[in-house]
């Protein structure tokens, strides 16, 4: 199949195919006598694997490493990498939950400014930090 057909079958665009080829994620396809790229059905499966791994949070560099390891032999470290990625995702989720909680406090308090908020019990800690203070040099002198 040609580039456009492969892209449509895998749910990506043609520029993504070219990029994946440059990165080594997708092998260089054979060419027709007219110079057109020709892909086999394995390319569709490979692209779907790459996209699925990205949806799981793996970067393209990580996907490339996993694919490379899998080409040489079964990749026993997939479990280890998946566990590490899970820890990373859980940390991001905790950060996002903290951000959400802070934003909910701002919304509930009806804050109207980062530096001069007029709401009661402002949850924003920025008012103190926004004040310009003279910088200090060594030994605490101004």
Image: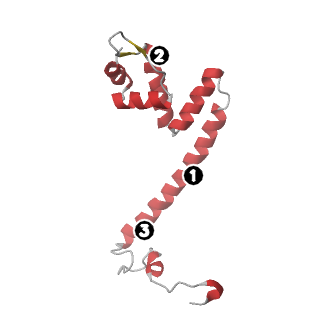
121, 24: nearer the viewer: 24
**Crowd rating for badge 2 (residues with CA inside 10 Å; few <14, some 14–19, many 20+):** few
Q: Give the quadrant of residue 116.
A: bottom left
Which residue was labeled with disc 2? 42
Residue at 35% across, 24% down: 7
Which quadrant, please, contains the N terminus? top left
Earlier in the chain: of badge 2 and badge 3, it is 2
x then y, percent, for residue 88: 58, 47
Residue holding disc 3 = 105
Cα separation, mark 2 vs mark 3, equals 51 Å
Number of numbered discs present? 3
| Front tag of 2 and 1 | 2
Q: In the rendered structure, which disc, 2 or 1, sits on the residue that comes first in sequence?
A: 2
| Quadrant housing residue 108 | bottom left
Q: Find disc 1 in the rendering and name its residue.
A: 91
* SS at circle 3: helix
Q: Residue at x 35, y 81 (%)?
A: 118
Q: Residues within 10 Å of mark 1 (few under 14, many from 20)?
A: few
Q: Which of disc 1 and disc 3 is earlier in sequence?
A: 1
User: Answer yes or no: do the residues labelled 2 and 1 have beta carbons within 8 Å?
Assistant: no
Say what secondary structure mark 2 lies in.
Answer: helix
Q: How far apart, in angstroms, are the residues tagged by discs 2 and 1?
A: 35 Å
Write down the quadrant of residue 15 in the picture: top left
Q: Nearer the viewer, mark 2 or mark 3?
A: 2
Who is closer to the viewer here, 125 or 76?
76
Closer mark to the observer between disc 3 and disc 1 = 1
């Amino acid at each position: 199949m040609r580039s456009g057909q492969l892209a449509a079958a895998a749910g990506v665009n043609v520029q993504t195919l070219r990029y994946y080829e440059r990165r080594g994620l997708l092998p260089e396809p054979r060419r027709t006598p007219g110079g057109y790229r020709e892909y086999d059905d394995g390319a569709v499966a490979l692209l779907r694997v790459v996209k699925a791994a990205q949806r799981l949070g793996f970067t393209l560099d990580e996907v490339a490493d996993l694919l490379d390891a899998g080409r040489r032999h079964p990749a026993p470290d997939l479990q280890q990498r998946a566990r590490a990625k899970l820890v990373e995702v859980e940390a991001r989720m905790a950060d996002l939950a903290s951000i959400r909680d802070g934003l909910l406090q701002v919304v509930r308090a009806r804050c109207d400014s980062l530096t001069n908020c007029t709401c009661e019990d402002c949850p924003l800690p920025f008012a103190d930090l926004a004040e310009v203070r003279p910088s200090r040099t060594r030994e605490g002198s101004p």
